[in-house]
Image (cartoon, grey):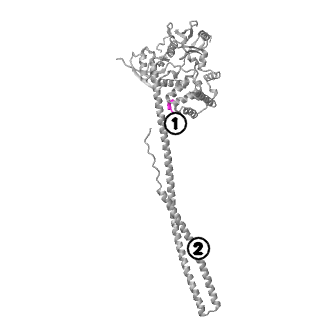
């Protein structure tokens, strides 16, 4: 039994490994890959590899993998990439997995500067890419520095502006917050809707010469074939839609495109290598086929896929609405919980305040009781003193009477008796005055004692009210809530030809009437204008690239991708071919 061949296929977000046989065809390997990924829109994709000459080549599906010039290594290396691009991502891409693969590939092309993107558009796209990765901005999960390790902007844009990484993050974070409520899948789609308006989006460029030998670029995309001057890949000069072409062929390095208009001459150009012509022919056939398919009614398979996608989107929207509703409920419960926690803290503080007041009242009560006892002692002493004084007064009165009797009895001299009488009289007056003072002092102490007694009664009543107040309610209890050429032989006399079908289609050429997302979406337009104004203050004009200068001039004269497309398709086919020959 022959030894199996190990194969590694790298998509934009995964690495897949397979073991194939020596007779496995490209289609069999391709089918294995798309089945593993779960992809049904297979017509956009292909398997890319580096051949033995170092050229990027697409695997031929009708030939054995082992018979193609894949670089010999173990395992064999392939990239699963978009080979053809849709005209309108919103109208054509059906599956989420398809949109995700396109999003990742287009993002990589922009970040590597393979597709030119102006700075303000790059920042806006960066914010959609952040939304697609992180979802809604959250202060808890998206702390400062959350974009430090993320590759969000082309290096060219970073170098052209005097902003630190923190300042870039601050700006992108502001726009990230703008996308709140947007699903990750919708953020990817919004990214693609803006990116598809970039001039270099979905274009395969090939070096060619016209009959005069002028170096030019041939650009192939979903809409047709365009010719660019050597120094400007952004602004095509001549264009031919796929519906104007009936036959494509080449012999050696001479490439011939026959227009449907029989009066028009053949469109002839020359490429430096035979393998380039093979690749051009292959891409022309694929793009032409998809161009025609888009202008016919959808097949049953596509209709089924669209119906399934609508159902899945509706289901996601319902799930999203349910999640939003549950989130609101959780937020309401959290707010109620926080409110109750605040009330609990307030009650605890009030209780603590009451306890402090109670302790103070108890201390005051003890102090007042001590003072009352002291006043009572002093009152008793005053009464005792008053009684003593009264006894002394009575004794003095008795003595006075005795003296009077003795005066009568002994018949002392009037002067002596009068002096003794005066002495005792003065003494009696002093004693009466002292008694009066003591009585007044006793009244004052009695009044103070009554006040102390009243304070004691009031304090006891307040203490009784505090001690009998209902305790604060206990805190609430919550339950826990919670994405070839094999041949490099320079065959000098071989002719390759492809007859292109164009009957039975609705050749509406609506693409010539398209406008950019920024023009039809006022929100995007305002965002881009705001970003352009904001970045202008930090821009270093000395670091502008050649493409920056071309883009600036295009904007100045009011030119965009679709306006240019209308312009380069003006006139009949013959006039445009003559213009090409004159370049």
Numbered disc 1: secondary structure: loop
Magenta-drawn segment: 132-142
Residue at horizontal 55%, vertical 70%?
A: 446
Secondary structure mostly seen in the magenta stretch: loop
Quadrant (top left, top right, bottom left, bottom right) of the C terminus:
top right
Q: Which residue is mark 2?
A: 440
Crowding near the residue tagged with mark 2, few <14, some 14–19, many ≥20 C-alpha atoms within 10 Å: few
Q: Out of 265 and 80, give the one closest to the viewer.
A: 265
Residue at horizontal 47%, vertical 34%?
A: 323
- Vertical order, 205 against 134 (above or below): above
- Can residue 234 be seen in this snapshot? no
Reading the chain from its start, which is encountered first: label 2 or label 1? 1
Residue 64 image-quadrant placement: top left
Q: Which residue is mark 1?
A: 138
Crowding near the residue tagged with mark 1, few <14, some 14–19, many ≥20 C-alpha atoms within 10 Å: few
Q: CA distance from mark 2 to mark 1?
A: 80 Å
Q: Does 415 sit left or right of 29 as displayed? A: right
């Amino acid at each position: 039994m022959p030894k199996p061949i190990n194969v590694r296929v790298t998509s934009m977000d995964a690495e897949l490994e397979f073991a194939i046989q020596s007779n496995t065809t490209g289609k069999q390997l391709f089918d294995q890959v798309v089945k593993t990924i779960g992809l049904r829109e297979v017509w956009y994709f292909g398997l890319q590899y580096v051949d033995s000459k170092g050229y990027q080549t697409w695997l031929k599906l009708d030939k054995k993998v082992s018979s193609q010039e894949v670089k010999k290594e173990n395992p064999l290396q392939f990239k699963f990439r978009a080979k053809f691009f849709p005209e309108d991502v919103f109208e054509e891409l059906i599956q989420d997995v398809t949109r995700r693969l396109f999003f990742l590939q287009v993002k990589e092309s922009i970040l590597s500067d393979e597709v030119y993107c102006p700075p303000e558009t790059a920042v806006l796209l960066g914010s959609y890419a952040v939304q697609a990765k992180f979802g809604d901005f959250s202060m808890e999960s998206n702390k400062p520095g959350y974009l430090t390790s993320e590759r969000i902007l082309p290096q060219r844009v970073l170098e052209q502006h005097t902003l630190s990484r923190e300042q870039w993050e601050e700006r992108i974070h502001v726009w990230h917050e703008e996308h709140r409520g947007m699903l990750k899948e919708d953020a990817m789609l919004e990214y693609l809707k803006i990116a598809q308006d970039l001039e270099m989006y979905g274009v395969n460029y090939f070096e060619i010469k016209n009959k005069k030998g002028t170096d030019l670029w041939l650009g192939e995309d979903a809409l047709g074939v365009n010719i660019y001057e050597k120094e400007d890949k952004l602004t095509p000069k001549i264009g031919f839609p796929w519906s104007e072409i009936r036959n494509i062929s080449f012999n050696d390095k001479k490439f011939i495109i026959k227009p449907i208009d029989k009066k028009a001459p053949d469109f002839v150009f020359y490429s430096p290598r035979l393998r380039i012509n093979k690749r051009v022919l292959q891409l022309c056939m694929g793009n032409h086929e998809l161009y025609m398919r888009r202008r016919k009614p959808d097949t049953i398979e596509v209709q089924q896929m669209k119906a399934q996608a609508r159902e899945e989107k509706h289901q996601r929207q319902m799930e999203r609405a349910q999640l939003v509703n549950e989130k609101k409920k959780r937020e309401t419960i959290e707010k109620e919980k926080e409110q109750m926690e605040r009330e609990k803290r307030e009650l605890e503080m009030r209780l603590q305040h009451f306890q402090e007041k109670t302790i103070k009242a108890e201390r005051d009560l003890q102090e007042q009781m001590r003072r009352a006892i002291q006043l009572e002692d002093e009152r008793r002493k005053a009464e005792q003193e008053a009684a003593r004084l009264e006894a002394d007064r009575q004794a003095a009165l008795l003595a006075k009477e005795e003296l009077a009797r003795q005066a009568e009895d002994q018949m002392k001299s009037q002067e002596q008796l009068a002096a003794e009488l005066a002495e005792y009289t003065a003494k009696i007056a002093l004693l009466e005055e002292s008694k009066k003072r003591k009585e007044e002092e006793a009244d004052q102490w009695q009044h103070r004692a009554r006040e102390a007694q009243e304070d004691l009664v009031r304090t006891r009543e307040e203490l009784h009210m505090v001690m009998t107040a209902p305790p604060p309610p206990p805190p609430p209890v919550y339950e826990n809530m919670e994405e070839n050429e094999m041949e490099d032989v320079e065959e000098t006399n071989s002719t390759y030809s492809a007859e292109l079908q164009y009957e039975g289609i609705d050749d509406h050429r609506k693409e010539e009437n398209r406008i950019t997302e920024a023009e039809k979406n006022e929100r995007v337009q305002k965002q881009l204008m705001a970003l352009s104004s904001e970045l202008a203050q930090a821009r270093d004009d000395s670091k502008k690239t050649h493409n920056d200068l071309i883009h600036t001039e295009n904007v100045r004269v009011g030119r965009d991708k679709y306006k240019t497309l209308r312009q380069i398709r003006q006139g009949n086919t013959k006039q445009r071919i003559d213009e090409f020959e004159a370049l």
